[in-house]
Image (spheres, coloured by chain):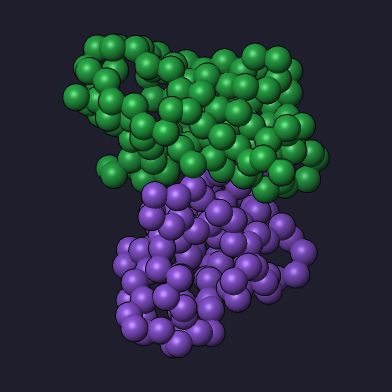
Chain colours: A purple, B green
Amino acid sequence: AQSVTQLDSHVSVSEGTPVLLRCNYSSSYSPSLFWYVQHPNKGLQLLLKYTSAATLVKGINGFEAEFKKSETSFHLTKPSAHMSDAAEYFCVVSLKAAGNKLTFGGGTRVLVKP
Amino acid sequence: GAGVSQSPSNKVTEKGKDVELRCDPISGHTALYWYRQSLGQGLEFLIYFQGNSAPDKSGLPSDRFSAERTGGSVSTLTIQRTQQEDSAVYLCASSSGGPSTDTQYFGPGTRLTVL
């Protein structure tokens, strides 16, 4: 079985300051991990994914995430928030052995203040 | 190229009616997934099709829900005798279905409201 916990349901940051979205996972096997973003009334867009290659993963729009097996974490960061980063972010885990079905975290809604 | 498309974008129906939701995956993608996004349950897996294999229906919440995929392409999710708790956004995703972990590309979703 696999599960994902996003530790913050809401995060508020000022424009130009760093963003940190926390994610912990549980999986019996080596999982693949993803971050997706959902802007209001839009579909889910992939930000980045980890599939057992480099532990530091760079994604689109300046986001990156680090896979830490010892901490079972996959936190998402961005050095400088932009107004367009206001959205909901989902940490996701999948297992190839389970048909790559995605298991989603509860989501973190990011508010960016000017 | 064209992404995943879903129709209708919005559907309002009365309790007890049947509804059909359609998904057109990215051309050439062999894997197709349905998910549901609701306020109470978040995002949850419903059903998965891979090529000609039998679908994985392990996420369907009740026998009122069914899905088919014709010709390995278009998929239809059917909800019979809709209930108010079925109100949600239904998302479809497709991937190339290769042996490695593939990115799933999502459609814009169908917002279902059951009155």
Residue appearing at x 53%, y 76% in the figure:
A77
Corner quadrant of residue A114: bottom left
Residue B32 horizontal side relative to residue A42, left or right: right
In this rendered view, identify the residue nearer to me: A111 or A65: A111
In this rendered view, identify the residue nearer to me: A103 or A71: A103
Is residue B108 in view?
yes
Where's residue A2, x and y in %? 53, 47
Residue appearing at x 80%, y 40% in the figure:
B99
Where's residue A20, x and y in %? 46, 77
Residue A73 horizontal side relative to residue B14, left or right: right
Residue B1 horizontal side relative to residue B56, left or right: right
Q: Quadrant of the N terminus of chain B?
A: top right
Residue appearing at x 65%, y 54% in the figure:
A32
Where's residue B107, x and y in %? 54, 40
Extreme residue in the right direction? B99
Is residue B59 in view?
no
Using the image, determine if residue A68 lies above or below residue B50: below
Extreme residue in the left direction? B115
Residue appearing at x 55%, y 27% in the figure:
B23
Where's residue B10, x and y in %? 36, 32
In this rendered view, identify the residue nearer to me: B58 or A39: A39
How many numbered markers are drawn? 0
Q: Quadrant of the C terminus of chain B?
A: top left
Residue A72 horizontal side relative to residue B84, left or right: right
Using the image, determine if residue A65 lies above or below residue A90: below
